[in-house]
Amino acid sequence: RKEVEQDPGPFNVPEGATVAFNCTYSNSASQSFFWYRQDCRKEPKLLMSVYSSGNEDGRFTAQLNRASQYISLLIRDSKLSDSATYLCVVTMNTGGFKTIFGAGTRLFVKA
Amino acid sequence: EAGVVQSPRYKIIEKKQPVAFWCNPISGHNTLYWYLQNLGQGPELLIRYENEEAVDDSQLPKDRFSAERLKGVDSTLKIQPAELGDSAVYLCASSLGSASGRPFDEQFFGPGTRLTVL
């Protein structure tokens, strides 16, 4: 089992739709969680950190469920410009600092 | 403020040849990372530096890969000899590290070097 797993998609949604991605992690010692966005042939960029209480940034909402070991990303009112790959990132300190990236979920928003 | 700079952006070599990638992190960032990313996959860590010290090189294939960050600023990743399976994008990232006061902080990525081994 991979340490961080994501549904690769692709998710094809119309503009204005709401779409949600989940990411599961296997190590209960995981401490910090992030969502990164990666456009085609570009570098990853931080979208948002994920806090235990959940957090929102405009149309984006991230949530953490430690009991079930997953994080989620909700995008409301999808825009064409949201089309990208969304990478789940989990960090942990298990006798040494470790950062694991998921393989990403591809999103296509169409007009 | 300049971001993470990497060069070259593209490199095509024949197998068994050596190749080197260069990275200049964001000024003031103590932590530097080298990642490998294959198509359809997330970045995989090769090595992490805290200043000039390699604190995690457990995933670096040391028989052919080497890296250095001599003055704790810019870094070089080398492959010698390259194999067909090394074709990938090599990403460099940096973060504030201990200077941020947080155990884990945002990583800023460079544009990457796309390596093709023929």
Image (cartoon, helix red, strand yellow):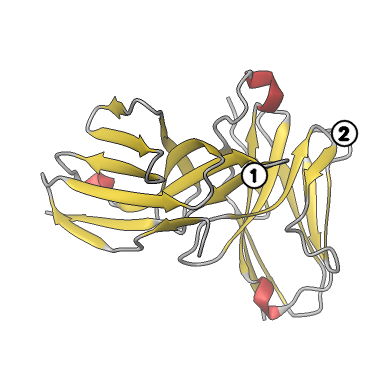
Residue A16 position within the rendered picture, expressed as x and y whole percent measured from the top left: 10, 44
- List the residue tagged with mark 2: B71
Circle 2 residues within 10 Å: few <14, some 14–19, many ≥20 = few
Task: Residue B28: tell me if it is visible.
Answer: no
Q: What chain does mark 2 sit on?
A: B
Element carrying mark 2: loop
Name of the residue lying farthest toward the right: B70
Query: To which quarter of the image does residue A5 belong?
Result: bottom left
Residue A36 position within the rendered picture, expressed as x and y whole percent measured from the top left: 43, 43
Q: What chain does mark 1 sit on?
A: A
Relative to A71, is A11 on the left or the right?
left
Circle 1 residues within 10 Å: few <14, some 14–19, many ≥20 = some
Q: Name the residue located 49 percent from the left edge and 63 percent from the top edge.
A: B41
Do the residues at discs 1 and 2 belong to one chain?
no
- List the residue tagged with mark 1: A98
Residue B24 position within the rendered picture, expressed as x and y whole percent measured from the top left: 71, 38
Q: Name the residue located 28 percent from the left edge and 63 percent from the top edge.
A: A10
Residue A66 position within the rendered picture, expressed as x and y whole percent measured from the top left: 41, 38
Q: Name the residue located 24 percent from the left edge and 57 percent from the top edge.
A: A108
Relative to B44, is B52 on the left or the right?
right
Task: Residue A60: tell me if it is visible.
Answer: yes
Q: Name the residue located 74 percent from the left edge and 77 percent from the top edge.
A: B83
Q: Nearer the viewer, residue A62 or B118?
A: A62
The residues bearing labels 1 and 2 have C-alpha atoms spaced at a distance of: 24 Å
Q: Nearer the viewer, residue A78 or B113?
A: A78
Element carrying mark 1: strand
Which amino acid type corresponds to the residue marked 2 in the rendered image?
Lys
| Mark sitting on residue A18 | none
Q: Nearer the viewer, residue B114 or B42?
A: B42
**Mark 1 or mark 2: which is in front?**
1
